[in-house]
Image (cartoon, rainbow, N blue to C red):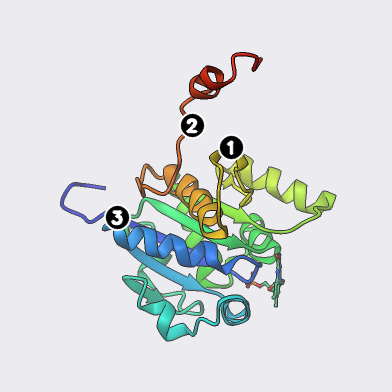
C-alpha cells in the first residue's frame, strides 16, 4: 500500500466459538487507527448473540465499513482494492473448508480467495477441537496456498490473569503477523529475571 492510502485490513467473523476474538480485533484495530472492513457470516450472528449478547448494530460501530456477506460486488471482492490482508477470527471449519476449495460462494470466502491470489496475508484463527484428519489436511492445503493457520491457543508464559488478557494476547499476536502494533502483547524477554530470583533454575 502507498503512503497515500490508509492502512486497511479485512476482518471476518465466522460462526465458530470465540466471537470475542473478532470483536477484540476490531477494538484493537480501531485504537491503532487501522481502517477495518468487516464481514460476518449468518452463523456468526448466532455466536455473537449467544456468547456476547452483541447485536449487529453494536458490532457495526466497531468497524470502519461493514459488508453484507452476500454482497459479492463489495470492494473487498476485488484485488484492485488494496489491503494488508484478512484476519478471520474466529474461523469455523465450514469457512476454512470453503476457502480451501476455492468455492467462493460468499463474500467471506471470495475476499479470502482474493487475498490469497494477491499474495497478501490471510490469517485464520481456526477454532475446533478435536481435529479429524480432514481438518488437518485442509489446514495443510491452506498453508501450502500461503494462508497462516493460527488457532487461538492461550499463551500461559504471558501469565494472563483474566480471560481478557488471554484473548488480547492471541489477537495481538495475530495482528503482529500484519506488522500492526496493538500494545496488547506481553512480549517475552527471556528468563534472566526468573534466574536471578532462583539461581537453581535450569
Ligand atoms: C454456539 C455455537 C458454537 C459453535 N462453535 C463452533 C466451533 O467452535 N467451530 C466450528 O467450526 N463450528 C462451530 N459451530 C458451528 C458453525 O456455526 C456451523 O458449522 C456453521 O455452518 C458455520 O458457518 P460459517 O462458516 O458460515 O460461519 C458453532 C455453532 C454454534 C451455534
Residue receiving disc 1: 157
140 vs 152, left or right, is right
User: Which residue corresponds to the image point at 67% horizontal and 58% vertical from the top-left?
Assistant: 127
Quick one: label 3 or label 2, which is nearer the N terminus? Answer: 3
Q: Mark 3: few, some, or many residues within 10 Å (few <14, many ≥20)?
A: some
| Disc 1 + disc 2, Cβ < 8 Å | yes
User: Which residue corresponds to the image point at 62% horizontal and 48% vertical from the top-left?
Assistant: 154
User: Which residue corresponds to the image point at 81% horizontal and 54% vertical from the top-left?
Assistant: 130
Is disc 2 placed on a helix, strand or loop? loop
Quick one: label 3 or label 1, which is nearer the N terminus? Answer: 3
Which of the pair 26/10 is nearer the observer?
A: 26
Residue 78 place in picture, x, y as percent? 39, 62
Residue receiving disc 2: 188
State which quarter of the image contains the C terminus.
top right
Residue 43 place in picture, x, y as percent? 63, 78
Quick one: label 1 or label 2, which is nearer the N terminus? Answer: 1
Which of the pair 91/155 is nearer the observer?
A: 155
Q: Residue furthest front?
A: 197
**The residue at label 1 has a CB less than 8 Å from ligand 1:** no
Residue receiving disc 3: 32
Amino acid at each position: 500500500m502507498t503512503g497515500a492510502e490508509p492502512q486497511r485490513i479485512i476482518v471476518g467473523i465466522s460462526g465458530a466459538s470465540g466471537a470475542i476474538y473478532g470483536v477484540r480485533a476490531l477494538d484493537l484495530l480501531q485504537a491503532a487507527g487501522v481502517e477495518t472492513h468487516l464481514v460476518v457470516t449468518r452463523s456468526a450472528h448466532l455466536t455473537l448473540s449467544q456468547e456476547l449478547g452483541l447485536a449487529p448494530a453494536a458490532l457495526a460501530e466497531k468497524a470502519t465499513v461493514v459488508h453484507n456477506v452476500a454482497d459479492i460486488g463489495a470492494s473487498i471482492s476485488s484485488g484492485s482494492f488494496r489491503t494488508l490482508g484478512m484476519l478471520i477470527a474466529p474461523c469455523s471449519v465450514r469457512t476454512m473448508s470453503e476457502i480451501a476449495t476455492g468455492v467462493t460462494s460468499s463474500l467471506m470466502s471470495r475476499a479470502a480467495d482474493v487475498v490469497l491470489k494477491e499474495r497478501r496475508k490471510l490469517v485464520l484463527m481456526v477454532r475446533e477441537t478435536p481435529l479429524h484428519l480432514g481438518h488437518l489436511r485442509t489446514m495443510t492445503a491452506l498453508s501450502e496456498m500461503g494462508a497462516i493457520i493460527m488457532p487461538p491457543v492461550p499463551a500461559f508464559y504471558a501469565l494472563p490473569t483474566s480471560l481478557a488478557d488471554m484473548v488480547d494476547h492471541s489477537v495481538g499476536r495475530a495482528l503482529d503477523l500484519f506488522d500492526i502494533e496493538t500494545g496488547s502483547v506481553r512480549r517475552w524477554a527471556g528468563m534472566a529475571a526468573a534466574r536471578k530470583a532462583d539461581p537453581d533454575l535450569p
